[in-house]
Image (tube, rainbow, N blue to C red):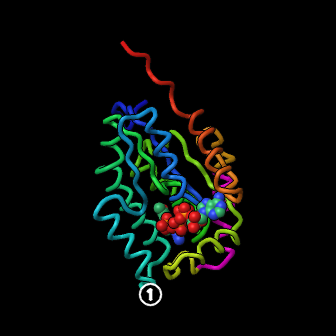
Amino acid sequence: MTLGGRVRRGFFLTLEGIDGAGKSTLAKTAAELLRTRYPDVRCTREPGGTPLGEALRRLFLEERGLPIGARAECLLFSAARAQHLEDVIEPALEAGTAVICDRYVDSTLAYQGAGRGLSRERVEALQNWLAPSWRPDLSVLLDLPVEEGRRRGQARATPPNRFEDEQRTFHEAVRKCYLELAAAEPERIRVLDASRPLPEVLEALRVVLEAAMPEAEAGP
Ligand code: Z5A
């Protein structure tokens, strides 16, 4: 498998879903499972993973009053991703590391495309430009009704961010887009019912991950 023309030896897993779907919770179990096959596992997130990404994350999630238009929002998430790919994701995959990324390109298609109403074609074209071979080996979509995501989010102590503040219709559009993306790419995007009790979701994750990981190479 190649990444931007170079040999790619690691495994690239992304976790997606609406707010509060359980991505951070599942990342820990995914890391344990990947460690059975890969000597190094790197957990990262978007926006984030680099000094630029973390600075933009603070800007998005903490500066609630700062006006950011839909196109600027899309470009800023994409800028953070370009840096993340260059500094973290591509070098790790090339070194044989398994990378788990909490949100990736599908988030931009769902939030900035469907949520903010930007043209899907333009958002996709931008992603294809900055990450020509951006496709993860596996993307796990944690699907959850919007109301349940809100309920889980409200249990947190932190104040709602600019996305959590959005109307229900915004989050419904995001969820719908995620499901459409999964229907269009069923091999890459596996949908898990995140409303089930956590042990069941973790078991479903184990099953899809085991099936997606390449067989261990035979020794010399
Ligand atoms: N964003 C964007 O617009 N465009 C982009 O391109 C990118 C991002 C990359 C990033 O915030 C924001 O940026 C995000 C989209 C936007 N919008 N928001 N908000 P984030 O990724 O940090 O925010 P988040 O998605 O809301 O993360 P989160 O709140 O931490 O959700 P999570 O990681 O999916 O859930 P969790 O923390 O693992 O679980 C939430 C709670 O539910 C927690 O108490 C768990 O114990 C509980 N939980 C988890 N699973 C279960 C089950 N199965 N049953 C019961 N309870 C559960």
- Of residues 94 and 173, the one nearer the viewer is 94
Task: Residue 197 in the image: state x and y as whole percent.
Answer: 69, 57
Q: Residue at x 45, y 83 (%)?
A: 64
* Magenta-drawn stretch, dominant element (helix, strand or loop): helix
- Ligand 1's quadrant: bottom right
For the record, the magenta segment spans 166-181
**Residue 154 percent across, percent down from the top left:** 60, 78
Please state, as top left, top right, bottom left or bottom right, where the C terminus lies in the image: top left
Q: Residue furthest top?
A: 220
For the point 65% across and 44% down, the residue is 204
| Residue 207 on image: x %, y % | 63, 38
**Location of mark 1 (residue):** 65
Dot 1 crowding, Cα within 10 Å, few <14, some 14–19, many 20+: few
The outermost residue toward the bottom is 65
Q: Nearer the viewer, residue 191 or 158?
A: 158
Q: Amino acid at mark 1?
A: Gly
Residue at image coords 50%, 82%: 159
Q: Is residue 19 visible?
A: no
Q: Is residue 60 magenta?
A: no
Quarter placement of the N terminus: top left
Q: Residue at x 49, y 52 (%)?
A: 27
Q: Is residue 157 above or below residue 30?
A: below
